[in-house]
Image: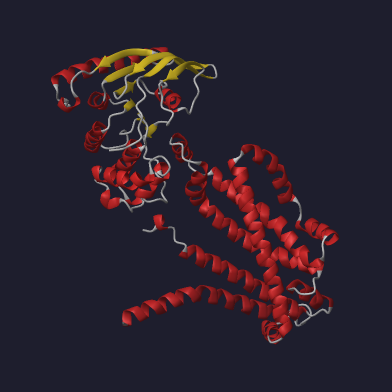
Amino acid sequence: MRTSTNKLARKVQLMISGPCESWLLVFFLWKLAALRIGKELILPAPERVFAVLLNLVQTPEFWRHFFATLRRGIVGFLFSYFAGVTFGLCAGLNSYFNQIFRPVLVTMRSTPSMSFILLALIWFKSDAVAIFVTFFVVFPLVTQNVLEGINQVDPALLEMAEIFRVKPGRILWKLYLPAILPFLVAGAAAGLGITWKVMIAAEVMAVPRWGIGTRMDTARIFLNTSEVFAWTAVVVSLGYLFDRALAYITKNLTLPWRKP
Amino acid sequence: MQDGIVQNGDIKVDRITKNYGPLRVLSGITMTIPSQKIVAILGPSACGKTTFLSILAGLVQPDTGTVTGLSAQGVGFLFQEPRLLDWLTVYDNLTFVLADKLPKASLRPAIEEYLKSMDLSAYRDYYPQKLSGGQRQRVAIARALLYPSPVLLMDEPFKSLDLGLKFQLIRDFLELWAKQPRTVICVTHDVKEALLLADEIYFFSQKPTVIKERFIIRKPRAERSLDDPDLLETEKEMIKVLIEENNRSSRLL
C-alpha cells in the first residue's frame, strides 16, 4: 500500500514539477521586469493580470466571448482538417490530381495569413472571417502531412497488395490509413497549434460581435494592457488544453501493434 | 483443402525480351512450365530472374514475346520478406488478401486449417512484430498457398532464414503444396533449395540473359535428401555451370 502511494506521489511530482518550476521562473522574471519598468500600461505585474482575469471570468460576457472563439476554432479546425485529409489522400493516391493540386497548395502555403485576413474582410461578414482564414492556414498544413505520410508507405506492401489484387477500398482502409496514422496525428497537433493563433489574429482584424480577439482589440484601444495580457493567458490556456487533450487521445488510442 | 482453384494447364513463355534503357536484361526466354510442377530458376546475381518473375506476375510488361496459360485469377506470390501489415494480426493479414477471394463460408475454416498446418494456430491474434522471422514467413506461406490461383510465384522465399529453419520451412511448404499441387515458379540462388523443391531447374546466363542449362530432377520429392548421391552429382554439375557463368561475367567486367 505504502509503495503504491509512493509511486503515485512520485508520478504526480514528475508530472507537475517540470512545468511548475518553469512557470515559477517565468513569473519571477515577469515580476522583476514589471518592477523595473514600473508602468502598468507597458508591462503589468503578474498578480495584476491574475486579478483582471479573475474579474473577467466572473462576468457572463467573458464566457460568451470565450465560447464564440472556441466554437469558431473547433469548426474552423475540423473543417480544415477533414478537407486536408481528403485532399491529401486524393493527391497522394492520384498523381494527376497531385500535379494539378500541388501549385494551389504551394500558393496557399506561401501566401501571408494577413492577405487571407484582408481578403476575407472584403468578402465575408466578420463572423466568418476567422473560420475562412483558419481554413486557408490549417488546410495546406494538414494536406502536406498526409502527402508526406503517403510517400512514406512501404512500396513493398503496396506491391504485395497489387499482386494479390486487393480491392482499392480495402487498400485505403487497411493499408494506407493505418500506415499514415502517425502523420494524421502530427497534422492534427500542428493544425490545432496554429488554429488559435490565426483565429485570434483574424478576430482582432474582423472584430466580430463575440470573440476573444474582439475583446483584445477593445482592451488595446483603451490601453488596458492588463486585460490584453489576461485574454492572452486565456488563449494560451486554450491551446495548451487542446494540446493535452490530443496527447491524451493519442496515448489512449494506443496502437496495439506497438505495445511492448 | 481449398475450393475455387481452376487449373489452367501449362504456362508457355515465348521469346520474352526486356530492356531497361540501352541494357538488355532478358533476351528471348522461351520455356514451358508444366501444370502443377515446381520449376526453379537459378542464375548469377542481377541476371534478370526477378524481372522474369515480375513479368509473370503482370507487374512488368515484356518488350516482345508472350506469356500464355496464366490464370485470370492472378497469381499467388511468396516474397523474400514476409510483407505483412504490422497493424493487422496474423488472421487479419490473411483476410486482408483473401476476404473477397474465397467464399465467405469457407474463408475462416480455410485460414484456421492452414494456420494449424503451419503451427500458427496459437498465434492467430498476434501482431507480426511479436513473431519470429520464421513464423512471419510461415504466415506468408499460408497467405500464398491460400490464394486461390493455380500459379504460385516465389522470389527467394527462404533466403533470409537460417539453415535449419530454411529446410524445415521447405519441408512444411512441400507438405502443404502436395495436398493441393499448383504450378510453382521459384527464383532462387541456392542450388540445394532448388534440388529439394523443383521438378525442373533452369539456369539463366549473365545479361543479356538467355537460358543456359536445364536440369530435370526425376527423383520423387519424398525420396530426396541433401546427402542423396544422385542429387549430389547433379549439384556438382549445377555448381560447375554457376562457376562458369560467374567466370564469364567477371571476364566481361
Q: Looking at the picture, does residue A171 appear above or below residue B241?
A: below
Residue at the image point whose x is 62% and y is 56% from the top: A82
Res B253 seen here: no
Closest to the observer, B71 or B185 = B71
So how many labels did they put on this image? 0
Q: Quadrant of residue A193?
A: bottom right
Relative placement, left or right, of B206 versus A42 is left
Residue at the image point whose x is 81% and y is 70% from the top: A207
Q: Looking at the picture, does residue B195 appear above or below residue A219?
A: above
Closest to the observer, A189 or B155 = B155
Whole-percent x, y for residue B94 in the image = 37, 44
Q: Quadrant of residue B148?
A: top left
Q: Quadrant of residue A48?
A: bottom right
Q: How is the image coloured?
A: secondary structure
The quarter of the picture where the C terminus of chain B appears is top left
The quarter of the picture where the N terminus of chain B appears is top left
Q: Looking at the picture, does residue B42 appear above or below residue B95?
A: above
Residue at the image point whose x is 39% and y is 44% from the top: B84
Residue at the image point whose x is 30% and y is 25% from the top: B36
Res B8 seen here: yes
Closest to the observer, A158 or A113 = A158
Whole-percent x, y for residue B101 in the image = 41, 39
Whole-percent x, y for residue A12 in the image = 45, 77
Determine the residue located farthest toward the right in the rendered image. Answer: A122
